[in-house]
Image: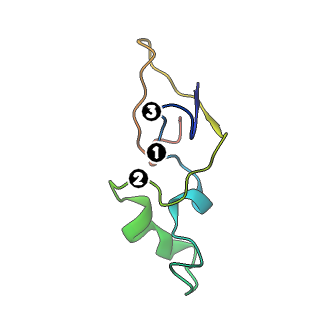
Amino acid sequence: MYLVGFGPNFPKKIHHRASSLPSMASHPQSIGCDAGFQPYFYSSNPNPNVLVRAIVGGLDQNDGFTDDRSDIAL
């Protein structure tokens, strides 16, 4: 398991809608349910909002993880 926002190598592309969409301050227009997939969900960029203290799992047999928001096993 990894704690988001802690240490130098925490997950930056977690599967969480509020974390992966821009804030209301930077994007005041409404983003519909399907409108969030492109360009946000499938983006290779880190989430614009860090969900501090969230815990993600999905470690492989070598204690590694794939930092990919489309991998819901995280």
Cα–Cα gap, marks 1 and 2: 5 Å
Question: Percent from the top left, x then y, of residue 60?
Answer: 45, 19
Q: Is residue 14 left or right of residue 44?
A: right
Query: Decide: marks 1, 2 in contact (CB < 8 A)?
Result: yes
Check disc 3: other Cα within 10 Å, few if <14, some if 14-19, many if 20+. few
Identified by mark 1, the residue type is Lys
Q: Which residue is mark 2?
A: 46
- Residue 23: image quadrant is bottom right
Q: Is residue 23 left or right of residue 69?
A: right
Cα–Cα gap, marks 2 and 3: 14 Å
Q: Which residue is mark 3?
A: 8
Question: Percent from the top left, x then y, of residue 49?
Answer: 54, 58
Q: Judging from the image, what secondary structure is the residue with disc 1 in?
A: loop
Above or below 59: residue 29 = below
Q: Residue furthest bottom?
A: 29
First of labels 1, 2 by sequence position: 1
Identified by mark 3, the residue type is Pro
Q: How is the image coloured?
A: rainbow
Mark 2 or mark 3, whichever is nearer to me? 3
Q: Judging from the image, what secondary structure is the residue with disc 2 in?
A: loop
Q: Which residue is mark 1?
A: 12
Asked whether 7 or 35 is in front, the reply is: 7
Asked whether 4 or 71 is in front, the reply is: 4
Q: Judging from the image, what secondary structure is the residue with disc 3 in?
A: loop
- Residue 55: image quadrant is top right
Q: Residue at x 44, y 60 (%)?
A: 41
Check disc 2: other Cα within 10 Å, few if <14, some if 14-19, many if 20+. some
First of labels 2, 3 by sequence position: 3
Q: Residue at x 51, y 31 (%)?
A: 7
Q: Is residue 7 left or right of residue 67?
A: right
